[in-house]
Each structure stands twice: as C-alpha cells, then as structure tokens.
Amino acid sequence: MEVEREVFLDAPPAEVWEALTDEEQLEDWFANDVEFDLDRGGVFRWDDGDVRHAVVEEVDAERRLAIRWWDPDGADESEVTFTLEEIPAGTRLVVTETASCDWAWALEAKAHAGRQRLLSAV
Amino acid sequence: MPEDSVFSALSDPSRRRLLESLAGRESASLTELAADLPVTRQAVSKHLAALGEAGLVEGQRAGRETRYRLTPQPLGEALAWMERIGDRWDERLARLREHLAGR
C-alpha cells in the first residue's frame, strides 16, 4: 500500500534537497529532534512521542532520496522516497510512502483518488 | 489482526479475483465461485482457506453447503493507514513550503 503526494515548491531543487537532508533544516519542518545524515541515516523524534529510525537506501543528489524507516520496536516499516524535478517555477516534489508488503491492488483506485496536488501560488 | 497473512493472501492474483467475485454478492458457495474462476474447485477451496486465515473471508454453513462472504475489515485498516500517513505528509509538506518561503 502506498501513499503519494505531489507539491510544487517555489525554490530550486538544490534548496529543496538541502531542506530534505540537512539536520538543522529538517528540525525546522520535518521533526522536532533530528539526528540524520546521508551516510548513516539516523533517528527522527516528534514531540508527540513518535520516533522513527531510518536508513538511507538511495541518494541521487538533488534528484532522488529513498529511506527505509521503522518504529523503535522494529515494526511498522515503510519506505519513503522523495523525487525532485526542476520546473520553471522551482521544484516539483513527489513523496511516496510505501509499506513493505505489496497488497496495494485493492487500494490503488482509492490511492489515486486521494492523491492530492498542493499547488503553490507561483 | 494477522497482518502478514493479509499481505500474503492478497499477493495471489487468483485470490484477488476471488475477492472481487465475493465483493459483488452477499455470499457465494464454492461451486458458484469456482464457476467464476479459471481454476479448479480444489484450488478455490485452498484460496478460500487462505483468505479466511487473513480475516478477509468468512464461511458459514447453510444446510449442506458453506456460504462464503467478504469480511473486509482488514482492508479498512489498510485504508486507515493510508489516510493517517497521507495526513502526516500533507502537514509536513505544508511546513516544508513555509520553511522554504522563510529562507
């Protein structure tokens, strides 16, 4: 099963990439406490008690980042991918989160219907 | 919920066809289901057992035959996962947008 989101951001891929990979920047928008780098992966912590451990699976600078992450019990594992594409107004960013088991068939139609396009006012 | 058995139950195309077939009716017998699928009765029976283990199908005896019906609660849980995860990404990406605007 997979969730996908697409956003258009008013910033070049280099800046978006930095926001996705820099520990300090991640703490500003992604999680409350971040220990993360592209070599070793790391840990994301949120103030509501949520914790995710992550490893980096794929790095193609300014284009694609894939991580695999799970909760502190080693459960609830999923893969998250970020795909960046340069567009005249900035960056098209597609995020997918996929649970490790493939049983998305029944849900594909609904996933498609639920796909949201958040258009920025560029 | 035995999640793993749900996953493996759904990994097979014949079992997915079987679920589709059941989704269209209130209940169905083994004979009715076998008529819908290009596989043997025996295979349908095996698939029904796997779907039963996954909690997706329930069999109930009615006289001499067993009627099978869809019990889609595990699928509802999958939809709930998608909604929860999707909501989180909506929030995160809204914050990413703000973060980039503030730089």
Image: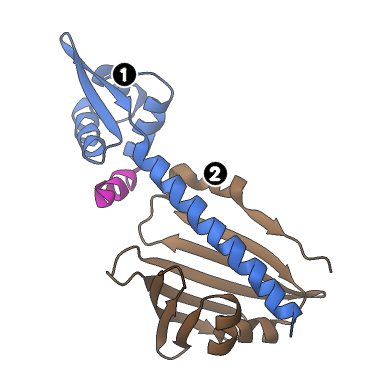
Chain colours: A brown, B blue
Q: Quadrant of the C terminus of chain A?
A: bottom right
- Report helix, strand or loop for mark 2: helix
Q: Determine which residue is flagged by label 2.
A: A110
Q: Please identify the quarter of the rendering in which residue A48 is found.
A: bottom left
Quarter residue A120 falls in: bottom right
Element type at mark 1: strand
In the image, taking residue B27 as reference, residue A23 lies left or right, namely right
Q: Which mark is residue A31?
A: none
| Chain on which label 1 sits | B
Output the chain of dot 2: A
Q: Residue B73's spot in the image, x, y percent?
A: 36, 37
Q: Relative to B91, does residue B99 appear above or below in the rendering?
A: below
Q: Main secondary structure of the magenta part?
A: helix
Q: Is residue A120 visible?
A: yes
Total labels drawn: 2
* Amino acid found under the numbered disc labelled 1: Ala
- The residue drawn where x is 60% and y is 76% is A29
Q: Which residue is drawn at the image coordinates 26% and 52% (left, top)? A: B4
In the image: residue B2, left or right of residue B11: left
In the picture as drawn, the residue positioned furthest to the left comes out as: B64
Q: Position of residue B101 (x, y in %)?
A: 76, 78
Residue B24 included in the magenta stretch of the image: no
- The residue under label 1 is B28
Residue A104 left/right relative to A5: left
| Residue at (48% x, 82% y) in the render | A33
Q: Nearer the viewer, residue A119 or A94?
A: A119
Q: Is residue B102 above or below residue B10?
A: below
**Hey, which quadrant is residue B21 in on the image?**
top left
Residue A60 image position (x, y, % from top left):
55, 84
Tell me the magenta residue range. B1-14
Residue drawn at x 57%, y 78% is: A64
Residue most toward the top? B63
